Amino acid sequence: MADAGAGGALLRCVSRHGLVQVQCALRRAVRWGLALLLACPALQAQALAPEVLELREARAVVTVQGQMTGLAVSLPYHWDRHHPGLPGQATFEIPFDLDEVPTAPQALYLPRLGNAYEIWLNGTLLQRNGDLLQGNGPDFAKGPRYIVISPGLLRNSNLFRVHIRADVGRRGGLAPLTLGPDETVEALYLHDYRWRTTGSLVVVIASLLIGAMAMALWASQINGDELGQPRHDPLYLFAGLAELCWTVSISDALIEHPPLDWPWWGMVALVSSTLWVCSMTLFCMEVAGWSRLPMARWLRHWLALLLVASVGAGTGALIYGHPLAMTLLYAVSGLTSLIFVVLFIWKAARGGPLPHKMVAFALLLNTLVGIRDLYAFRLSQTYGGNTYLRYSSLLFGLTLGYIVVMRFRAVSGQARDLTANLAARVAQKEHELAQSYQRVEQLAREQERTAERARILRDMHDGVGSHISTAIRQLESGRASQGEVLQTLRDSLDQLKLSIDAINLPPGDITALLANLRYRLEPRFKASDIELKWDVDLLAPLVRLDHKAMRQLQFMVFEALSNVLQHARASVLRIELHSTVQGGAQVLVMDNGCGFELDRVKTRGLGSLRERAAAIDARLEIVSEPGNTVVEIVLG
């Protein structure tokens, strides 16, 4: 809660007031952070009940490079501090006296020991882990140790004997021994175990998930650069690398049996830690928008040099036993990080965006925690404590999550605006298109009316006009009889009626077409003493016959019927309509008149019949002999 309050205070001061208020908030954050960091050891010290013994004084026999040395020591005994760069073994004898032999189960708690160890009490082996003679094997100095002691093993005068094997650079040694009632000691052990083991596991899982998410975002989110070229966002790449490297570095605190032999696994952990520092620096540069500044190129080169130097420092410290190399690496890396953090926080305090300020707060808190850890593990004599930097580093993951959420909110807002703009443009285009359709439809109707008028005028000219012109010539010549002129005028009237009927003629309905012709011409057949025989089937409309084709067919049938009325001198006229095998229609006009010879008769009517048949892709057959003339029209 103190961290959250400090973070909220810092962000509110930056956003509302200015540099002076930011400095006040930073001072409060430092005080709260230090109070939090110092709280846990104080609480742990207060938790020691009077009946709990903390054993610190011991007699040690240390073996280094074959040389044995006996000395009195005060625990903790940090092997890397006393014998830098050298492996070896040690035996610690810790005597203690009890006023009363306890009757209830007791417990022994050791915050840290090893790398391999044996624990004896009054000549009885309590616990053993690892090989005391074979170095660079499994590391059992990772977690705290808890051993339940039967009351029968304790006396008034007692002796713990602890044998350890320590490897180079693996934090081997022996922490003070805590002995007391089972429940009390177990509480101390569980507190330490949860912070060092369970907490580390939570951090590893969280960092792994955040790193995987960041790498997935880097692989999937592609933006365009200034030149329009596709570009992956490096912010996600650096954040993902940092979290994955931190996962490897923290997991070292959990792995007693490393996947690689020591010191190679130590090299992996060291390089991962250095790569974490480099990646976090580059991540912060992306957040602040410094990646395109001239100094960014030099900083990248310097970070790459640090990464290469970490390999050399790890080789010198872990393989050749020169711990000063690692100390120098930490010093240079820490100084680089400190300068960058100061500059980053200073820029954030001078009005950086909210993500910049949040990352600055995370850097500030991690810097304070890192200083505490540096003091606890490198400067003080404590051995077996807990590092807090692994937990404070989760702030970077939370900050990354906030940045991702804000970016997706911004992208969603842009998408909504783009969708709304696109919808408005689509609606406008639809409105314009509807208006265009209306204009096109109006023009189509006008063209249709114009075409219909032109057709009617053409039919009137070719049909009615032609017959009236013929009647006029007949009257002017004086040679035509009254009956001939009357017949010509009747044909003209029939043509006029058929032209009017063609306006409402159903497309493809041949049955209706023939019925209309019968209605118009049957009175003339009766007046001419011609018997009409009707054999017309009710056929479904032919889809391919439109208004124009129906008009052509109407004139063909009318022409055939008109020839019967004018020239055939027939007594019987038969009209038939049947369907064909192919789904078409067959129209037959048959009479028993005088007939004619097709080769000798060259009339305009026959030529018109053939032209109209070709226009509608119909097959026309004419057979004529005295007593039987057949006009056949076949429509596919």
Image: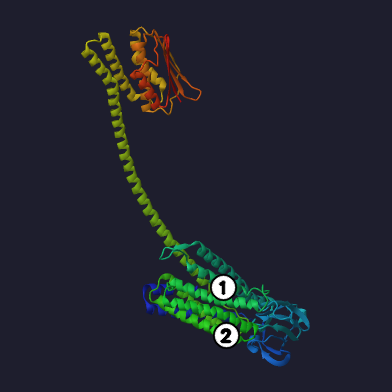
What amino acid is found at the position of numbered circle 2 in the picture?
Thr
Task: Judge the density around disc 2: few (<14), some (14-19), many (≥20) Cα neighbours within 10 Å.
Answer: some
**Element marked by disc 2:** helix
In this figure, which residue is indicated by the disc labeled 1?
A: 246
What is the x, y in percent for residue 112?
Answer: 66, 80
Q: In this view, does 449 lie above or below 224?
A: above
* Residue 391 location, quadrant: bottom right
Closer to us: 245 or 17: 245
Judged left or right of residue 342, residue 488 is: left
Q: In this view, does 624 lie above or below 276?
A: above
Judged left or right of residue 437, residue 50 is: right
C-alpha distance separating marks 1 and 2: 20 Å
Task: Judge the density around disc 1: few (<14), some (14-19), many (≥20) Cα neighbours within 10 Å.
Answer: many
Judged left or right of residue 587, residue 87 is: right
Q: Is residue 6 visible?
A: no
What amino acid is found at the position of numbered circle 1 in the picture?
Trp
What is the x, y in percent for residue 440?
Answer: 32, 39
Q: Which residue is drawn at 51% across and 23% down?
A: 581
In this figure, which residue is indicated by the disc labeled 2?
A: 327
* Residue 65 location, quadrant: bottom right
Closer to us: 110 or 236: 236
**Element marked by disc 1:** helix
